Every structure is written in C-alpha cells, then in structure tokens.
Image: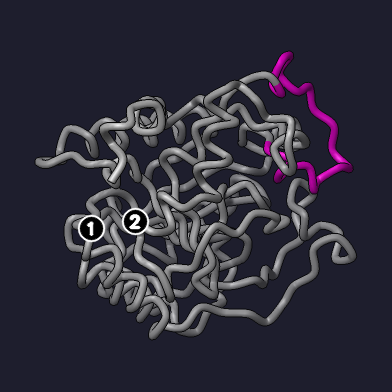
Amino acid sequence: MTLDDQYSFLERRKTFEKQYFNSIEEQNILSTISVIDINTIDICNRSCVFCPRNDPSVYPNRNLKMTARGAKIISEKLKEINFSGTIAISGFGENLLNPEISEIIRVLKELNQKCFVECNTNGDPLTTTLAKSLIESGLDCLNINMYDGPEQIQKFDKLLEEIPKNNVKYRMHWDPKDYGMIYNNRSGIVTWLKSETEEGLKNSSCNYPFYKLFVDWNGDVLFCANDWGRTRIVGNLLQQSVEEVWLSKGMEKVRRRLIDNNRNFNPCSNCNVNGKLLGEKSFNVLKEYYENSSYRK
C-alpha cells in the first residue's frame, strides 16, 4: 500500500488536477470544478485534537446522514455536466458510519464512470466485507487516515489483503508534531491549537471556491470545504443544477473578494489555510469570466 504524508498527498492531488485538465475534451466554465467533496454524515467516532469535534460543545455529533436516494439525485446532476474530475467522499464526519455508504458510492460511480471516486476514513468501522463492498460498488481509492501509530499498518494490511493495492492509500497522522497534515484551523473553529499563520494571509487570494464544490449531507452546497461552521450556503444540489449553484450570486460575491486579494470577511478572516496550493487554473478562468462581459449570458 502507498504510505502518504501531507507532502506526498499534496503532490498526488496536483497530479490528479493536471490529469483532469489534460483529459477535458470540451472545456467550459463548469470545467473549473475539478473536485467535488461530498459529506455523507455528521457523526464521527473519534475526537482528534486538531478537529472541531475534539470539543463537543463546539462541534457536537448529529445523527444526520445522506441517503442513497439523495446521492442519486446529485449523481444525475453531475452527469448532466459530464463531470469527469474527482468525487471525494470526505467532509465533516466518518463516512463509513453511514449505513448506505456502499450504495451511495455505487450511484455516484454508475452514472459518472469517468470520475475518480475516493473515500476518506479513519478505518475504525472498516471490515474486509465492507472494503470489498466499497470496491465492488465502484470506489477507486480508499484513503485510510491512521492516527494511532505505525502498528496500524500491519492491522490494515491483513484486513485488506484481498483488496487490490492500487485501491488503497494510507496516510500517517500519528506524529503530534504536525499530525501528518498541513495544519487547518477549520475556518477558525479550532482555537485550541496555535500555528503560525502566513504573513499577509488576509490580504491574499484563495483558490478553494474556484475549483472545489462541497456538498453537505442534505444537498446544501457550502462556498468552501473548510467552512465547518456552515456560514455560507450558496445553494442546494437536490433542488438546483450544478450551474445554478456554481455560478450563484453567493459564489460570485466571495470570488470577487478573493480575486481582489481580500479575505477580510467571515469566515475567511479567521482561516489559516494557504488556498493557493491547488486550483490556479480554475481561479484564472473564473477571474476572466467575471472580468469579461462576453462570458455573460
């Protein structure tokens, strides 16, 4: 199995992004969406120190789940735009706790064969049977985040010995120095861990709302995957098309501020994320879209 730290994981993301844009036959404004994050559940069995769920008074577990029926509606919307990027089952909870997770993956992949479908998990709910079900449903990659220590490698190697190695990636998160990640304060919600915010961050742009679409368990679309407080909901994919949400007034308002290197608004003013690591091409295309009136309908 591949063992990733934060840097090799980022390089893998950059490779995916490059492959995505090279594969698009007919580019249009919706081609700027290279990644779609889908949060299927609002519960996690862990309370990691770097996560808002470390403090239940700040971020409590809620028994809220996406259904396979809802996922099918979203999948149909993605098929309408011929989406061929990455669908990441990720977000704010432990997605393998959703009892319909295999069926959710099946309906997403079945209608969007060109997409790369991956799922992030802490691995705690994982069994050999569930792993087989996920792969048989069309999952391309299971990203297992290991928080306890290197001894987990042997555990998961045994559990997944019947799963093709190219369908599984391991991520190391057990080192308390940096937890194997580029630290993210979840738009300012995680206040109990301190980090050095990049100088001048509030006067810089961010590419997240230009290349990534985040869909919550109920179809709500947040302007950014790091908006754990759900402060800016820009649409709902159960009720609207991808185009209506992606080019909504809410997204335009945020993007225009970021184009002007302005992060002095909620929740961006409290966020410590360097949003320029990915998404540069999407940023430039949408910047031109807003600046060039010929792109307007």
Q: Say which amino acid is labelled 2.
A: Glu
Label 2 close to label 1 by CB (< 8 Å): yes
Residue 198 among those drawn in magenta? yes
Circle on res. 81? 1
Q: Position of residue 204 (x, y in %)?
A: 62, 20
Q: Position of residue 55 (x, y in %)?
A: 86, 59
**Residue at the location (50% across, 27% down)?**
7
Q: Is residue 136 above or below residue 227?
A: below
Q: Is residue 111 above or below residue 228?
A: below
**Coloring applied to the structure:** one colour
Q: Quadrant of residue 232?
A: bottom right
Circle on res. 68? none
Q: How many marks?
A: 2
Q: Residue furthest left?
A: 25
Q: Position of residue 105 (x, y in %)?
A: 34, 71
Q: Is residue 157 above or below residue 30?
A: below
Q: Say which amino acid is labelled 1.
A: Ile
**Element marked by disc 2:** helix
Residue 69 among those drawn in magenta? no
Q: Which residue is mark 2?
A: 243
- Left or right of residue 200, residue 57 in this image: right
Is label 2 or label 1 in front? Answer: 2
- Left or right of residue 245, residue 52 in this image: right
